Amino acid sequence: MLSVSVGMLLLLLAVGIPVAAAMIVLGLLLAGWFSPMPLWIAFGELTWGTSSSFTLFAIPLYILLGELLLRSGISEKMYHAIAQWLARLPGGLMHANVGFSTAFAAMSGSSVACAATLGTIANPMIKRYRYNEPLFLGTIAAGGSLGILIPPSIPLIIYGVLTETSIPKLYLAAMLPGVLLAVLFSTIILVCCLVRPAWGGQALTAAWRRRWEVLPDLLPPLSIFILVIGAIYVGWATPSESAALGVLMALALAVARRRFTIKMLLDAAEATMTTTAMILLIVIGAFLLNFVLTAIGLSSLVTHLFSDASLSPTAVLLTAVVFYLVLGMFMEPLSMLIATVPLIIPAIKAAGIDPLMFGVLMMVLMETAMLTPPVGINLFVVQGTRESGKLKDVVYGALPFVVTMLAMIGLLVFFPSLTLWLPGILS
């Protein structure tokens, strides 16, 4: 039954059926073949219950927040301000790419939006300052992926809903690994440019007076992050409510900077609705499929397979890592998360692995999937922001950062305290 289910899902995806439709069709087929009861009768109630979840309401709000930041010009000013402080390091603006990605991720929670925004802003700098093009493009693709891990991460919200795990605790668990991964990215850039100085392009200088002058451009991202995340941890707001506060603050900043127009608001709303519809349809399809898999006993079967193999918790994690690294090469990361986590999480819990730790590990695995061909979505996003050049340049440039992510995965597997320390002292 397990092999039939996985094989059918891969077949449906291979023939080009959208992920959400593939999961719904698979759920109907499995319910008809393996269940003695007409499970499809419950699909209407499940669809309504899933789509009306108050927690999931945070998703369109965080997407709208990112769209407003992009269209109001706040993102571009933030990039140039960060560049004034980091461009003196060997690697120059490549460190600014990582720094911008970290700051943008802490405001919007969207990796694709981060990569697209950064690519549009930073790509003209490659030829102007003579950077090694593949490595520079790799920093954009890798930096953009940080939106999955650094709070307020949209995939972490979905993981929390799927596994019934506290979202505030997941945010706490992801903070230290997120910052550490950003530091590791900058370290890789530093090492590459020390070994090959020509890769770092033309040296940039900035007077201290200029650095102090641009500091106000860093206040919007900092204030939004403090408002959105701080409101959650002091108990003033839920994740959905704090996202709404972030949207209000972004609107206020757009008005204060005289960048607010009705057209800008409508464009941001249209982009938000398009992305939200895609995400929620996949979530609904995953919940329906998970309901069928649980009803026909497939979830229990997976748990028994792991328990009968008598694997240690570390071995279970390593098995999951290999599975997701391979699957991530052929499946879009968000679809991979939603389609597989409900199936594997019972086995993870049965092995005594903390869902908080596995959630953070899952985010890093999703980040890796965004950079691994042939379906690495960030590779195509970055390529789409270029005026010319081949995709292989982006792929080659992303390789050092894929290795860095694999090292981060190893740290999480063998040192789970990286994720559990902060929730333990602040919860």
Image: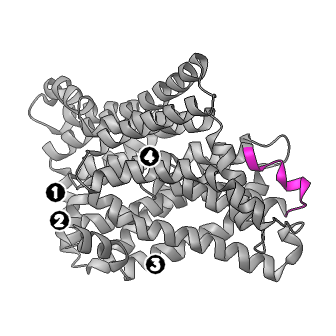
Looking at this view, is 71 or 171 the one in front?
Answer: 71
Residue at 76%, 67% in the rendered image: 208
Q: Are marks 1 and 4 in contact (CB under 8 Å)?
A: no
Q: Position of residue 249 (x, y in %)?
A: 45, 37
Q: Tags 2 and 1 in contact by the CB under 8 Å rule?
A: yes
Q: Which residue is mark 1?
A: 300
Judge from the rendering whether residue 343 lies leftward or rightward of residue 243; answer left or right.
left
- The quarter of the rendered structure image containing the C terminus is bottom left
- Where does label 4 land, which residue? 334
Disc nearest the viewer among 2 and 3: 3
Residue located farthest toward the left when viewing the structure as drawn? 37
Q: Which residue is mark 3?
A: 410
Q: Around disc 4, counting alpha carbons within 10 Å, would you say few (fewer than 14), some (14 to 19), or many (20 or more)?
A: many
Look at the image and give the residue range highlighted in magenta.
121-131
Whether residue 239 is situated above or below residue 81 in the rendered picture? above
Mark 1 or 3: in front is 3
Q: CA distance from mark 2 to mark 3?
A: 26 Å
- Rendered residue at 25%/64% (across/down): 355
Please name the amino acid that badge 3 sits on.
Gly
Where is mark 2, residue-wise?
Answer: 304
- Report helix, strand or loop for mark 3: helix
